Image: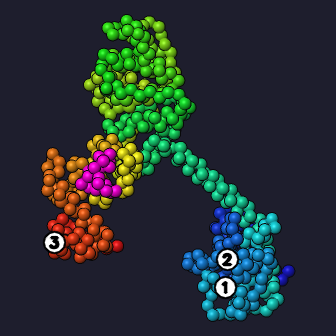
Amino acid sequence: MDKRESLELSVLYRISQAMAHRRDITAMLQEVFDIMEKDMGMSYGTLTLRRPDTDVFVIEAARGLNADELRRGQYKVGEGITGTVAQTGKPEIVSDIGKDPRFLNRTRSRKSVKVAFVCVPIVNQRQTIGTISIDRPAADEETLGKDCEFLSLVANLLAEAVGSIREQIAEQESLKAENERLRRQLDDRYQPNNIVGNSKIMRAIYEQIAQVADSTATVLIRGESGTGKELIARAIHYSSPRRNMVFISVNCAALPENLIESELFGHEKGSFTGASALRKGRFELANGGTLFLDEIGDISPAVQVRLLRVLQERQFERVGGDKTLTVNVRMIAATSRNLEDAIKSGRFREDLYYRLNVFPIHLPPLRERRSDILLLADHFLQKYNAAYGKHVKRISTTAINMMMAYHWPGNVRELENCLERAVLTTTDDVVHGYTLPPSLQTSEATHTGILPEEGASLETMVESFEREIIIDALKRHRGVAASAARHLQTTQRIINYRIKHLGISPKDYRQ
């Protein structure tokens, strides 16, 4: 055994050891090049792998290339010498890359130096899955032939390991793609059709809805008035196995204290004055389905006792009756009150609170999900266009700024009312700032200073209207004040004066 054969055998052994201890393909290939550089004097080499389900080979590991050169190293099957080896599955030896027109120098790393190039395929299960190549100083054909034979041995040694790792990667990619597909399906499932909103906090609520929908757990929805608590309750019901059964909603705050027991539990004929016939309560009517009790924090202590029994045993008696009725009802409650404070003051039973608070969902106020304001506004715009036969197409910049700056104490309900009003009052196909309620005419949006607490003054409304007209004209004429003045049939001097007075910057509209 001559010195070269002994060296090659040593290198092959070390490469096999590296493959046995490395499962990360890139790290393993880099170690192979480290060995070849140290023990064989190789100064430049590349290993390409086929991208899954494509005919493109990309450099996976290299020696002598910087990051930019690595990114450029991509070859289609049949393209250049590397692409030819990938296509034919046969080695290629080029004694002088400067004289072979097939050599593309795709990485643009070679200079005008006479070097030889050896490239061999990496074949696994009769398919070329990659190539390995080296640059070396020019040499005679015998030396280059021996280099090619040795490089082929390295490729054969790598083939099974690379193929095995690629199979694992492909399996992981397939699993990742399947997980992504399932995630998209779950996202679609999580976002009910009756709710508009894509903010992070709303996506978390959609996940909670999906988590609790298939169970029978009691849900307590908490949030300010107007945030859409009933929509969440309906989403839970229609995502649950009870979706084909009845959904009954009761606003406890809207019922008089002397009637709420009768409404919830029903009454027997003659049980009180005016009870001329037997009447089923909401619990009976919701049997098999879902009962939503809104504003649960407003019920009286006497009703709380009876409600606690229903939650514990699913049993009750009608008012004036002695027959015990058993129901199968999914309970969802909601409140805008602070129940913890009500417990401390003795207005709400602690044991009832814990029965209701099995799965709490907190619905944020609109001011905490501002990224959803425009989505909701567009939804309501389309809704009331259809309801009133209008064709309002967009919301002006000023109106958008007003909506985004406003604190929305009435939450989504207030936003809906604002858009309904705007659709009704607009005279063209645009929702303008001046068509929004006076409460939205803020100093930040109109640039007119501090407004009185009772709303917007006449001067404020006029300046808001004027500002929006001038901005629309500047937008149309790309920030050119003279063109905007001609469009508005006034002089440039007047326009410039009003622009300065209203704090408008024409350069903002030049693009």
Q: Which mark is residue 494?
A: 3
> Mark 3 touching mark 2, by CB under 8 A?
no
Residue in the picture at 22% in, 63% down? 467
* Picture coordinates of residue 37, whole percent (x, y): 67, 79
Magenta segment range? 419-436
> Mark 2 touching mark 1, by CB under 8 A?
yes
Residue in the picture at 24% in, 57% down? 445
Residue 422 magenta = yes
Local secondary structure at mark 1: loop
Local secondary structure at mark 2: strand
Pointer 2 residue: 75
Q: Which of 295 and 169 is in front in this view?
A: 295
Pointer 1 residue: 104
Q: Which quadrant is home to the C terminus? A: bottom left
Query: Residue 485, relative to residue 417: is it above or below?
Result: below
Callout 1: few (<14), some (14-19), or many (20+) C-alpha neighbours within 10 Å? some
Residue 331 magenta = no
Between tags 3 and 2, which lies in front? 3
Q: Which quadrant is home to the N terminus? A: bottom right
Local secondary structure at mark 3: helix
Between tags 3 and 1, which lies in front? 3
User: Disc 1 marks which amino acid?
Assistant: Leu
- As measured in the structure, the alpha-carbon distance from the residue carrying label 3 to the one carrying label 1 is 66 Å
Callout 2: few (<14), some (14-19), or many (20+) C-alpha neighbours within 10 Å? many
